[in-house]
Amino acid sequence: MSDSVSRRELLSAAMAAPFLGGISGLALGADAGMENYAAFANGKYVLPPLPYPYNALEPHIDEATMRLHHDKHHLGYVNGLNKALDELAEARRTGDFNLVKHWERELAFHGSGHFLHTLFWLNMGPKGGGTPTGSLAKAISRDFGSFKAFMAHFSAASKQVEASGWGILAYEPIARKLLVSQAEKHQNLTEWGVIPLLVLDVWEHAYYLKYQNDRGKYVDNWWNVVNWPFVQRRFEILEDIVLQYERRMNEGARRR
C-alpha cells in the first residue's frame, strides 16, 4: 500500500476506537466514495450517515430498528462524546477538576459507543453474508481452527454478553493474531492494544423491535448481513501498518 493511499484512507477515517486499541483508522474497505464517512467538523464529532438505505438490511434487520438505532441511539453517543470533551476542556480552563472522574467515564462510555457504532454500520451491507476470503480467511482458520469454529465462538460470546454490550473480532498487533472478545457497556471487558475488525451490537435497542428478547435469533440472522469485503480490507490495512512499523523499527535498530 502506498503512503498516499494509507494517508487518505486512514487519516480521513481515523475511527478505530482509540478506547479499544492502539492503531487507529477505519480502513474504508470496498465502499467507494466513503472518504469522509468518519465525520469530524469544526472541532466536533458528527453523526455519520448510514452507508445504505434504512431498509437495506431487511428482512434480517428491520427499517424501524435502523432508524431508531442510527438516528437516536448513535446520535446520543455523538452528543455525549462532544459534551464530555467540552466539560473536560472547561475543567482545564478553570482548574476545577472536581468532576473529572464523572466526565472521564462519560468520555469512555459515549466515545466507545460512537466509535463502535461507526464501525458497526460499515461491518454490514445489503449484499452481505457468506464467508471471508483471502488473507482474512486464512487468518481465521489459523487462529480459530476453521471459519465454522470462529462463527460458533463469536456467536456464543455475543449471545452471552451480560446485559448490554458487543461481540468483537479484534486484531492483536503484537502477535498479529485474531481474537474474539466481549465488551460490556462499550467500555468494560475491553483489551488494550487490540483493534476491532468486526463488531456486533447486542444492546437491546439493536434488535428488540423485531426479535423482542430473542438475542440468539438476532445473532444467528446477523451473519447474513456481514460485509466481509470491508472486514477483509480493514484487516489487510492493519496488517500492512504493523509490517511497515516492524520493518522501520528493525531498520532503526540496525542503524544504532
Image: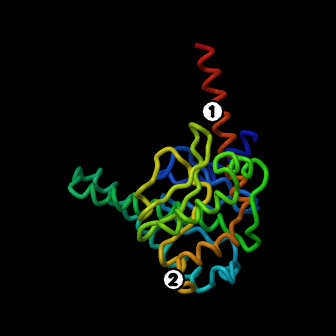
Instruction: Say which residue appears at 62% left-offset and 33% top-offset.
Output: 245
- Tell which tag, 2 or 1, sits nearer the viewer: 2
Whether residue 110 appears in this view of the structure is no
Q: 250 and 131: which one is in front?
A: 131
Q: Which residue is mark 2?
A: 208
Q: Is residue 38 left or right of residue 102?
A: right
Label 2 with label 1: CB-CB less than 8 Å: no
- The amino acid sitting under disc 1 is Tyr
- Find numbered disc 1 in the image and state the secondary structure of the residue it sits on: helix
Q: Tell me the crowding category of disc 1: few under 14, some 14 to 19, or many 20 or more residues within 10 angstroms, Cα based.
A: few
For the C terminus, the quadrant is top right
Residue 165 spot, x, y in % from top left: 46, 66
Residue 77 spot, x, y in % from top left: 45, 68
Residue 22 spot, x, y in % from top left: 52, 44
- Find numbered disc 2 in the image and state the secondary structure of the residue it sits on: helix
Q: 90 and 103: which one is in front?
A: 103
Q: Earlier in the sequence, mark 2 or mark 1?
A: 2
- The amino acid sitting under disc 2 is Tyr
Distance between the Cα atoms at labels 2 and 1?
Answer: 43 Å
Vertical placement of 150 versus 221: above or below?
Answer: above
Instruction: Say which residue appears at 52% left-offset and 54% top-offset.
Output: 17
- The disc placed on residue 113 is none
Q: Which residue is mark 1?
A: 245
Residue reaching furthest to the right: 134
Vertical placement of 95 versus 244: above or below?
Answer: below
Instruction: Say which residue appears at 54% left-offset and 66% top-offset.
Output: 117
Residue reaching furthest to the top: 256
Instruction: Say which residue appears at 68% left-offset and 67% top-offset.
Output: 226
